[in-house]
Image: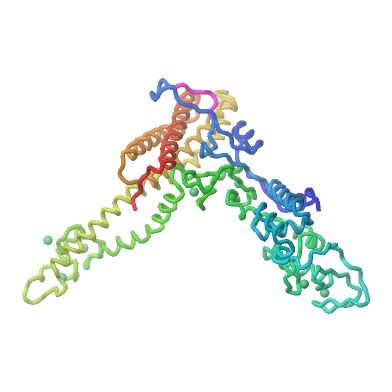
Amino acid sequence: MTDTDESSQFDEESYPSDGSLDYDSEDQDMEDSQFWEEDEEMEPSSDNFGAMSHSEAIQVDHTALAASSQRVLEPEDLLKGQAADVARVSELTALEPWRAELLLWKDDWKVDHVITKYLEQGEKVLREAGMLSDDPVEFVISKPRPDFMCFLCCDEDKATSFKLACGHECCTECYSHYLRGKIQENGSLDITCPMNCKEIVPKPAVMLLTDKKLQAKYQSTLCTRYVRAHNDMKWCPAPDCGKAVKANISVTDESVIPIAECNCHQQFCLACNIDEDHLPCPCKVAARWLEKLRDESETMTWMSVNTKPCPKCTNPIEKNGGCNHINCTQCGNHFCWVCLGDWAKHGSSNYQCNMYSPEQAEEDQKSVNAKREQLDRYMFFYTRYNNHRDSAKLDEKTYKNITKTMETLQKEGKMTWLESRFLPSSFEILRQSRQTLLWTYAFAFFLDAQPEREIFLKNQEDLELHTEGLSELFEYKWDRIPGAKVNFLDKCSYLKSRRQKLVEHVMKGMEERNWKFLN
Ligand SMILES: [Zn+2]
Ligand SMILES: [Zn+2]
Ligand SMILES: [Zn+2]
Ligand SMILES: [Zn+2]
Ligand SMILES: [Zn+2]
Ligand SMILES: [Zn+2]
Ligand SMILES: [Zn+2]
């Protein structure tokens, strides 16, 4: 089985490319080279907005994290990676490639570990991995012969047959049928002999007994396992993308947030399961925030517990003082918070609210106030976080109009396509800034009081102000765009440097373990 054979089989599966707008030739170059390159620093000459220098071409910084470098792996790259590992193990252990592959599968593709283990323990390792014999094996289909009977279908009539080293022989039709079922259930190098003995059906046998479509499925299951076995690799979560990203840095270092970007522009974190760019939030803080969002429903429950319907008009009323005498603002009803009875009767001789206790009411109110304060604080951050999410969704609509604007500018002879290419690039800067901004609120929510916090908040404020500024430019009608080009470019290069500054400030604190978070 050669490399090219494998990849052509794997290609049986379709990997549709997305139809996204390729607006940036630099972007295209990066995709070709498959390496995320660091863009040149574009520090404005001064913080003074007007006096800032700008460059004609806006460089979109696709590297979410300046220090990280990542590689996008196509299915072919994954196959090559596996083949290289197999070849290495095979060479150093003098085992056939299919045996080397089984050992790698068994030990999560830890190449050096597999080699050492085999050299130390030999045949025992093979047996544990499902190779009952180390005799040389030839994977061939036997011709029909009179003494053969298939143990599955009991057919003895001129059937071709197959068996592994364990000797359990059945007709090729039964064998293929059995393998099809296993492969469709995501079986790969864990498929055992149909007789249920421990012998694994190795890849060459599977290739011999299955069609191309099944082979592709089998190979893709193998690939999935290969990617999962590497903690620096992850599948792109975009549906039908089929590519993986490998980090060239340590993803277990907590001071690093390895945000990957696939060629399809999907961003995701290699260290946690958040499928977006969550900079500047460290993974743990981001996870805490998402958990907090999930608890929001609990908050809502709490609010409903602390709201009671007016017994007369059912208007929901929240108690906001210690006094249990409630006066409904909608219908003017006076009632008791505790028993919902008519307040006029409270304290009179013919009626008593026997649950009423001023001391208890005061206690309740204290805890209500504390919760209210926490909720208000949460709502402050949540509203801003969510607002940027909503704005990002609205921005997507803007993005769809960009091509139209560019076409109009060209048609009206105001700008060539090339001259208006700053529009999609500017949009990318806007998108990135918003993405970072929304996570700054999650970060700030958990941030304990500390001097560096003030710097962070200042950076956040600055980024927010100028993000909105750029966002406004996109509201312009097409005929104002040519005149605003310089403004676009200025705002973009400023925003880009502000975003970088904010992220770097947070990362520096992470490296030095300076950030103090609330419990
Ligand atoms: Zn059979
Ligand atoms: Zn067997
Ligand atoms: Zn992708
Ligand atoms: Zn993460
Ligand atoms: Zn009162
Ligand atoms: Zn009422
Ligand atoms: Zn009462």
Left or right: 8 as drawn, with respect to 499: right
Camera-side residue of 258 and 427: 258
Q: Residue at x 70, y 54 (%)?
A: 115
> Whole-percent x and y of residue 259?
52, 44
Above or below, 5 relative to 24: below
What secondary structure is the magenta-colored segment mainly?
loop
> Whole-percent x and y of residue 308?
25, 65
Location of residue 126 by image quarter: bottom right
Above or below, 170 relative to 415: below
Could you tell me how many numbered marks the image carries?
0
> Whole-percent x and y of residue 358?
13, 66
Q: Residue at x 89, y 76 (%)?
A: 148
Q: Report the residue that reaches farthest toward the front.
A: 120
Camera-side residue of 147 and 235: 147
Q: Report the residue that reaches farthest toward the left.
A: 349
Report the span colored magenta: 52-58
Above or below, 43 relative to 308: above
Above or below, 514 relative to 308: above
Q: Residue at x 82, y 61 (%)?
A: 208
Camera-side residue of 232 and 281: 232
Left or right: 369 as drawn, with respect to 297: left
Give yes or no for residue 202 being in the magenta stretch: no
Q: Residue at x 39, y 47 (%)?
A: 442
The figure's colour scheme reads: rainbow
Location of residue 28 by image quarter: top right
Give yes or no for residue 55 being in the magenta stretch: yes
Camera-side residue of 330 and 261: 261
> Whole-percent x and y of residue 52?
43, 22
Q: Report the residue that reaches farthest toward the right.
A: 146
Location of residue 388 by image quarter: top left
